[in-house]
Image (cartoon, helix red, strand yellow):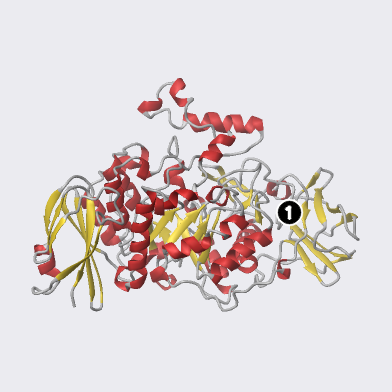
Amino acid sequence: MAASGGGATASTLMSEQFFGAIPVRGGVRFRVWAPTAAHLTLVLHDGRARGEHPMPRHDDGVFDALVDGAAAGDHYRYRVDDGPVLPDPASRFQPDGVHGPSLVLDPGAFRWNDERWRNRPAGDRILYELHIGTFTREGTFAAAATKLEALRDTGITVIEIMPVADFPGCRNWGYDGVCLFAPSRAYGHPDDLRRLVDRAHTLGLSVMFDVVYNHLGPEGAYLTEFNKEYFTDRHITPWGRGVNLDGPFAPMVRRFMIENAMHWVREYHADGLRLDATHALIEERDGAILRDIATHVRACADRPVFVHAEDHRNLAAMIDDPNQSGWGLDAVWADDFHHIMRRLLNGDHHGYYADFAGTVGELACAIQRGWLYAGQPTRRQNTPRGTDPGRIPMHRFVVCLQNHDQIGNRPRGDRLNHSIPSESWRAASVLLLTVPMTPLLFMGQEWAASTPFQFFTDLEPGLGTLVTAGRRREFSDFPEFADEARRSTIPDPQALSTFEASRLRWEERTTPPHCYTLNLYRTLLTLRLDHPALGASSELRGDAVAIDDDTIALRRAEGEDVFWVVARFRTGGSIDLEPLVLARDHADSSWNVVLTTEDRPFAPDPVPPTVDPAGPVIRFNRAGAVILKRAK
């Protein structure tokens, strides 16, 4: 064994892999940061260098050794001081689960075919959030790759993969990940994930990875056995102690996090990252870690890389230009759109929905500026929320009708299309896919899937019992779950049946009524991609008007292309667009009907509206939507 010559510091330019087992000529370099450990021993379980190898400690708490004869395919663990052997906190693969030995991998051995790939432009990004374990019956990376062509043909341009960092057990949403560098063995080998990304790029699809840095899962989080300073009592989050981003030892904590983000881009060719719950990454210099992550992941690739955040604070600085004191992220999940739509369409009023009246006026306001709350006090707590997004391009706001949280955090994991009339669902879908923001779909949405997406785990029995009880206790304030007997009917997260119920049924896509919804989504996405006027916009404001309590009108235009989208969410009624059209377009304009949601390909029981293009005037017989295009 030959010891390395000196430890790197957190300020070192991150131009190469630092943490983990790194194959080099003739051996493997093992590097671990364990600042509170006095001794650290590498235990190689097999291979030419099998045995125990004490590792030199450097002043920065990094243990670093080059082991001659070690190679890809070797299994290894570490012993911290005189404790038990533990997996590598920067392991690239855990073939026997998060409690087992780590495997040395050579990411450079994979042969990529995407040398000319350069990512999708912001204007035509249509995000599709999917969970590998429930996306297909097999629940693997390899099986997911076989469905990509269907997504491409539907009009999806970006797949956003829910977290794959390895987790305890065989099933999990992914937000209980503990091996942050290791794709879960429940989904396959890391090279299967590379093949999935490579196949996506061949088909013209961008790939985003959802990553979680605000907490670790409750089981198998051995990272803290190496570094007891990774979390701090100075900051408290909904998951407990906050990540140490600004105290003693923070520089290397930050380096670990940043290198993990870079690793998904370098080793898996990710086109973008979605950072989970960034409001829980608390530090004295607000947003500094997000700026650093974005800067490094962009610098480490030879192609554009985009970074999105999930954050409920409505902070314009997050997605503003760094030259304007912004944090420089590419987009943020703008949940106000979803919350307004959910209350408008289904009447939800518990929790954060209470901050919204669910009016068409609120909806128009959210579309006009990206979100509703821009500094005004909330209804529940009467405290200011949000900032003015007036100089933010519309494409930086990611909006949805549903996502994993908004479905899975419901007691039974029911989708919005399970709760409202199909004609209202079609109208809402038209609006989502014509707004100037970036739309996000949740897997199966394009065919109005019948399957729920329920909360599921596979934790060790003692912890699992607590999770089940806590999950049911969350809903004790809901009138329908006021008594314990009713709460016991909420699906058990630990039960295999809960996971199985959440798997998509792909055969639905070709059968009524699902095939009608799929036809609508395909048509809308084709329109959006074929007409830049309907894509995600660089304009600073959307043009939306609340016509009445049930109807919204949206104007989209670029060059000679001008569209009016009219969506009516409840009941029938007559809508006269003439005053709006005269205010914005030529008085002598004539209009063609592009589609209505009651066209026979989209509705199994069509009740068509009457459209008089002279006004234009639309007479809806029930909820629905109409897209008009100005005749040239």
In which quadrant is the C terminus drawn? bottom left
Give the percent coordinates (x, y) of residue 340.
Answer: 30, 48
Give the percent coordinates (x, y) of residue 516.
Answer: 35, 53
In which quadrant is the N terminus drawn? bottom right
Residue at 64% over, 57% down: 253
Nearer-the-camera pick, 17 or 288: 17
What is the quadrant of residue 219 in the picture? top right
The image shows residue 249, relative to residue 505, as above or below, that is below
What is the quadrant of residue 358 in the picture? top left
Nearer-the-camera pick, 242 or 463: 463
Total labels drawn: 1
What is the quadrant of residue 15 in the picture? bottom right
Nearer-the-camera pick, 272 or 90: 272
Q: Secondary structure at mark 1?
A: loop
Q: Amino acid type of disc 1?
A: Pro
Give the percent coordinates (x, y) of residue 359.
Answer: 22, 47
Task: Identify residue for label 1.
Answer: 35
- Decide if residue 219 is on the left or right side of residue 520: right
The image shows residue 59, relative to residue 558, as above or below, that is above
- Decide if residue 618 is on the left or right side of residue 28: left
- Decide if residue 152 is on the left or right side of residue 355: right
Circle 1 Cα neighbour tier, 10 Å, few/some/many (<14 / 14–19 / ≥20): some
- Decide if residue 255 is on the left or right side of residue 373: right
Q: Is residue 157 visible?
A: yes
Give the percent coordinates (x, y) of residue 266.
Answer: 63, 69
Q: Is residue 288 visible?
A: no
Residue at 59% over, 55% down: 143
